[in-house]
Image: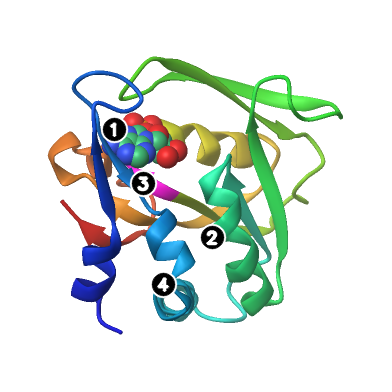
């Protein structure tokens, strides 16, 4: 399955979750057995087995991609969640979203010092979410070896905020 076929599965939902936002709904990609395995494989191939110790998934759609990527690497999987959801001691980062504001948290012992961490999410928009997740990992001693997002909204220039990282995206708008 090629990337144009996968791109055709992304559903655009205008005015969700609020007026003016065109929401990129990846659920049809996840539900397609060929598309799902292809996107996971492409992320794994880009970063390479043996190069990643932990995969961080960003709530909530990032979790769905992070777990199979981690499995293929033989790596652990770690959640970054919205404030108030994680039960243990956390570090937190607040940032501006394409729509609204948010605070993300990471368990302070989720990554060991020096571990190589890949951050995974569904959509890169302004880059604030990925940047906050990467900062959280670095604050607890992890080394961010890359960021992978299924979709990149290039017109929001998130990539310009993430020039320190190997940013891998599969479908661009
Ligand atoms: P940002 O921090 O601006 O890069 O926003 C990225 C986060 O918001 C990701 O976790 C996405 O799931 C979500 N997001 C932002 N814009 C969209 C969009 N147009 N469609 C789907 N998800 C989006």
Q: Position of residue 126 (x, y in %)?
A: 29, 32
Q: Residues within 10 Å of mark 3 (few under 14, many from 20)?
A: many
- Residue at 74% across, 26% down: 85
Numbered badge on residue 123: 3
Tell me if 101 is positioned left or right of 103 in this view: left
Q: Which residues are magenta?
A: 122-126
**Mark 3: C-beta under 8 Å from nearest atom of ligand 1:** yes
- Residue at 30% across, 84% down: 1
Circles 2, 4 touching at the beta carbon (< 8 Å): yes
For numbered disc 1, what is the local secondary structure? loop
Q: Position of residue 99 (x, y in %)?
A: 33, 20
Circles 2, 1 touching at the beta carbon (< 8 Å): no
Find disc 2 in the rendering and name its residue: 65
As measured in the structure, the alpha-carbon distance from the residue carrying label 3 to the one carrying label 2 is 11 Å
As measured in the structure, the alpha-carbon distance from the residue carrying label 2 to the one carrying label 1 is 20 Å
Q: Position of residue 113 (x, y in %)?
A: 74, 50
Q: Residue furthest right?
A: 88
For numbered disc 3, what is the local secondary structure? strand
Find disc 4 in the rendering and name its residue: 39
For numbered disc 4, what is the local secondary structure? helix
First in sequence, mark 2 or 4: give its number.
4
């Amino acid at each position: 399955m090629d990337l144009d076929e996968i791109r055709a599965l992304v559903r655009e939902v205008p005015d969700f979750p609020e007026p003016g936002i065109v929401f990129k709904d990846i659920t049809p990609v996840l539900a397609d057995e060929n598309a799902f395995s292809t996107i996971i494989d492409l992320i794994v191939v880009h970063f390479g087995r043996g190069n990643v110790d932990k995969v961080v998934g960003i709530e909530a759609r990032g979790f769905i991609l992070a777990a199979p990527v981690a499995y293929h690497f033989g790596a652990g999987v770690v959640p970054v969640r919205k404030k108030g959801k994680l039960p243990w001691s956390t570090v937190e980062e607040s940032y501006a979203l394409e729509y609204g504001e948010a605070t993300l948290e990471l368990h302070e012992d989720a990554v060991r010092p020096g571990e190589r961490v890949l951050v995974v999410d569904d959509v890169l928009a302004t880059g604030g979410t990925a940047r906050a997740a990467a900062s959280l990992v670095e604050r607890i001693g992890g080394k961010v070896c890359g960021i992978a997002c299924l979709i990149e909204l290039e017109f929001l220039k998130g990539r310009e905020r993430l020039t320190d990282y190997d940013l891998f995206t599969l479908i661009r708008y």
